[in-house]
Amino acid sequence: MRIAVNTRFLLPSKMEGFGWYTYEVVKRMVEQHPEHEFIFFFDRAYDERFIFGKNVTPVVLRPPARHPILFVLWFEFAVFRALKKYKADIFFSPDGYLSLRSKVPQIGVIHDINFEHYPKDLPFTARIYLRYFFPRFAQKASKIITVSNYSKKDISSTYSIPEDKIKVTWNGCSPLFQPLSEQAIRIIRGNYSNGKPYFLFVGALHPRKNVHRLIEAYIQYRKTENPTHELVIVGASMWKNSSKLEIPSSVKASVHFTGHLDLHELTKVVGAASVFAFVPYFEGFGIPLVEAMSCGIPILSGNLTSLPEVAGEAALYCDPFDVNDMSDKMWELATNSNLRTELSAKGLERSKLFSWEKSAKIVWEELLNLKAIKI
C-alpha cells in the first residue's frame, strides 16, 4: 500500500499539537509496517529526523502552506498533483485538511471544530477559510478520525455526518512525562518561579485557551491571605495579531511567561508544578492534561467540552467563564494538601488509559479498512 501523508507540521524548531500528533502516530506506523510505502508531503525543507524509515519518500510541495490563500494552493493544486504523480492509494491528513479535487480515498483527523462555535477568536481570513472548507472536508473524507467522544458528537451534529463515519482515538503523551524527585523540583522552581510552588498553564496563547481569565483569577488569588503560589505560563501566541496579555504591576513579579519550550524542558516544568491549571472554554482533547496526570500533578480543569472526558476524577473542575469560581478553586488547591495528594494519585492511575501506541494502532486499522473497501 502506498500512503501519502500530510506532514507539514513536522517542524524541527516548533513542534506543537498537530506536529506532535503527526510525529507520534505516523512514526509508529512507518516503523511497524516496513512492507508499506509512505510518501511524506512537506511544505518546506524538512529535517532528516522526520524521515522515519527507508520506506519513506519525502516530497517538498510549494508554496509553504501557512496562510488561508496558500492552503488552497497547497491542498487543491500541489497535493492534488502529487497524489496523482506518486500513485497514492490513500491520503492521510493528521490536521484534517484534505484535497477536495482528488479522487484518492482520504482520512482526515479533525481534532475539533472550535471555529464553528467561537469564530471571533480567529483572524478574519482563517475564520472564513475554516468555516467554508471544513464542512466540505468532513463530507469529502472517506473516514474521519477524531480525538474525543465530545468531538465526535460535535462533528456529527454540526456537519450532519453519520456517527459511524467517525472513529475516536484518544491522544497519548510522551513517556518522558514522569514524576520528579523533590531535589529536581526545587531546582526547577528556582529557575522558573523564584523557588516557590506554582500554578502552571501549558498551551498556545489562543483566546479559547482562556489564559486572560486564568490571570484574572490568579490576581484574585493573590489578594487572599498569605498566597503561596506563583503562576507560570508556557506557550507562544498562535496568531501574529494576538493581543498581548496585560499583567498588573502588583502581581507582575509572580507571573512568568516562558514562551515555547522544547520537550525535555517542558517535562521538567510540568513535573515541578504544584497545580496544573488548564481552563479552556473549548477543547477537542487537551494533551497537556495527560502530561500533567503522567507527572502526578493535581489538576484544575475547565468543566466544558472534552476536558471532563479526559481528566475524569483526576481534576477539580471550575466554570471557565466564572473568574470567581476559578479563583476559589485555585485557593482550595493551593491550601489543601490532602486534595492535591488525592488528585495526584488519581491522575497517575488515569494516565495509563492514554497511549500513542493505541492511537497509532487504531489509525492503522482505519487505513487498512479503507484500502480493503477500495479494493
Image (cartoon, rainbow, N blue to C red):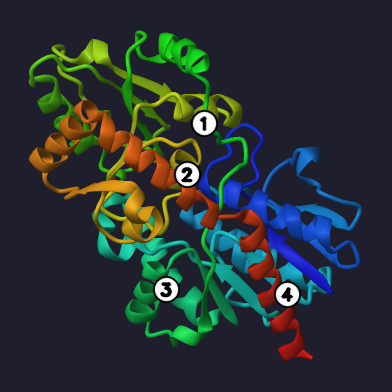
In this figure, which residue is indicated by the disc labeled 3?
A: 152
Quadrant for the N terminus in the image: bottom right
Q: Earlier in the sequence, mark 1 or mark 2?
A: 1
- Asked if disc 2 and disc 3 are in contact, CB closer than 8 Å, the reply is no
- The quadrant in which the C terminus is found is bottom right
Amino acid residing under circle 1:
Pro
| Residue pointed to by mark 1 | 179
The amino acid pointed to by label 3 is Lys
Residue position marked by numbered label 2 in the rendering:
348
Nearest to N terminus: mark 1 or mark 3: 3
Q: Are marks 1 and 2 in contact (CB under 8 Å)?
A: yes
Relative to the observer, which residue lies in front, 83 or 284? 284
Residue pointed to by mark 4 = 90
Name the amino acid type tagged 4.
Ile
Element type at marker 1?
Answer: loop
Nearer the camera: disc 2 or disc 3: 2
Q: Earlier in the sequence, mark 4 or mark 1?
A: 4
In depth, the one of 17 and 106 nearer the eye is 17
